Image (cartoon, helix red, strand yellow):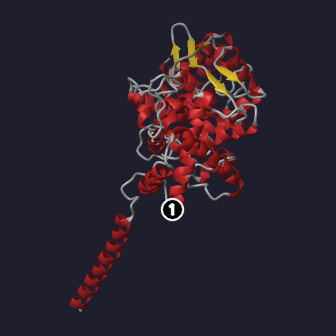
Amino acid sequence: MNSVKEESQTLLAELLVSSFDKKLDKLSADPSYSYAASIYNVSQTLRKANEKAYTPKLVSIGPLHHDESQLQGMEAFKLRFMHKFLTRFGVGLNTIAKFAAKEESFVRGCYEGTIKLPPKQLAEVIVLDGIFIVELLLENYFIQLRDKNEILFDADRWMYTDLMHDMLLLENQLPIRILDRLLNFVDLSFLNEGTMVTIYDLAHNFFKNIGITSKVPLTARCSQARHFVEFLLFLHAPREKHAASKDKGLRMQLASKRFEYSRSATELVQAGVTLCSVEGMGLFEVSFNKDSHVLTVPKLTANKWTDTFFRNLIAFEHLGYYGYFSKNITSYVMLMDRFINTSLDVHLLVKHDIIKNELDHKQQVADLFNSLHKGVLTEVNDFYFADLCESLDERFWDAFISTTLGQSYLLSLHLSCSFLPSYKQSVQFSRLYQFNLLPIQGWFVQIKDLAQILLNQVLIS
């Protein structure tokens, strides 16, 4: 009986080995197997918040949206740009065709999931889309290359707006390696007085109206980017690794509250904080001087691409493909959401030159930042600005406690607590504090995130 059972188990094991051998052989035979994907499909969770922010409007770049009917009108533009590129720079079509055939396997492996396009069609995408982007970037950088009536560069036309939107999309990318190698076929010495121009220089110039791109220089890190979304992420990421809090235990204890609650610009100004703008610094150079009570925030332009820009960076950041960014862009967006509750907060930030508003109304800026991180779940300890928010909250409560109303409120808490049995003080007081949230003055909206701090002060006294 045992021998029959052992034979059955042996047969099952052999079948499993055979099955997995076939699957692994098939995987190894896939030419894209050796390449790590870096261009992803945006999750449905994020799409639900704003489908349009992840969907191309005008032009498809790469294979993910290639066959969509509403984008086919730009194929003629791509052919026209390809003709200009080949004739202007004397690049042979045969040379480009051989290049695309050689790179087809690499490109296929850069995308998440299976690309259904056959090799010939994907190679065509590499040629048409790749040359279109390179020619577009060149004509943007070297104005003398443009046709006199080229409408794609007219900032007042809808095509320019939609084109910029599409170039920011995570699902609408070609690997920068392809663009860089296509650019290498071109001799630009006659255009730039012998000075070398890289694909990163061209991209930096093209995206100058996005985020704070025009305010920050290229870094060595930018040259490691695999596509334009990652390029913009590197450009806007912190220059240095974020230093850990001196008291890590305390930071983790309070991080949940700092992550969920912080003070709006209006509340901070009413608490005596001075708002100050700074240019030429990265997004993460936000600082608070505890002595002078000055909060310094890098200037940001809010325009028609801001929503698309941040949403696609956040989508790429949250894929967690190698944990490199620690959700920094998400942290910045969440901080701005805390600073901005209403259009009044936007008014203050515009007044102090922290935000340049190019949208129609201040409420649009408020709505933008209040909705950007919907559908995004972030671990508490990923929040980049936990220490900053803690310092701002301390200033807020220092200002509150120093007022007559604040002192009266603390006294009432102390008297209430004195009537509670000592062994029940912490539990009952926490409950009393948790559920009796009073609107104190117009700017004192919610106080429960100070419950433990006030409780400790009362118990000590």
In the image, taking residue 37 as reference, residue 215 lies left or right, namely right
Q: On the picture, is 52 further left or further right than 422? A: right
Name the residue: 53% across, 31% down.
Answer: 202
- 150 and 351: which one is in front? 150
Depth check: give the residue in front, 309 or 136: 136
- The mark total stands at 1
Above or below, 404 against 354 in this view is above
> Vertical placement of 51 versus 413: above or below?
below
The quadrant in which residue 410 appears is: top right
- The residue lying toward the viewer, choosing from 86 and 343, is 86
* Residue 267 rendering spot, x and y as whole percentages: 66, 19
Q: Quadrant of the N terminus?
A: bottom left
Q: Is residue 91 left or right of residue 360?
A: left
Taking 302 as reference, is 98 above or below it?
below
Residue 36 image offset from top left, x and y in percent = 40, 51
Residue 171 appears in the picture as rendered: no
How far across and down, in percent of the image, does residue 243 sit? 39, 25
Question: Could you say where residue 352 lies in the image, as x and y percent from the top left?
Answer: 66, 14
Residue 302 in view here: yes
Identity of the amino acid at label 1?
Lys
Per the image, the residue denoted by label 1 is 120
Q: Secondary structure at mark 1?
A: helix
Nearer the observer, 315 or 448: 315
Residue name at image x 53 percent, y 40 percent: 229
Task: Look at the picture and state if 199 lies above or below 387.
Answer: below
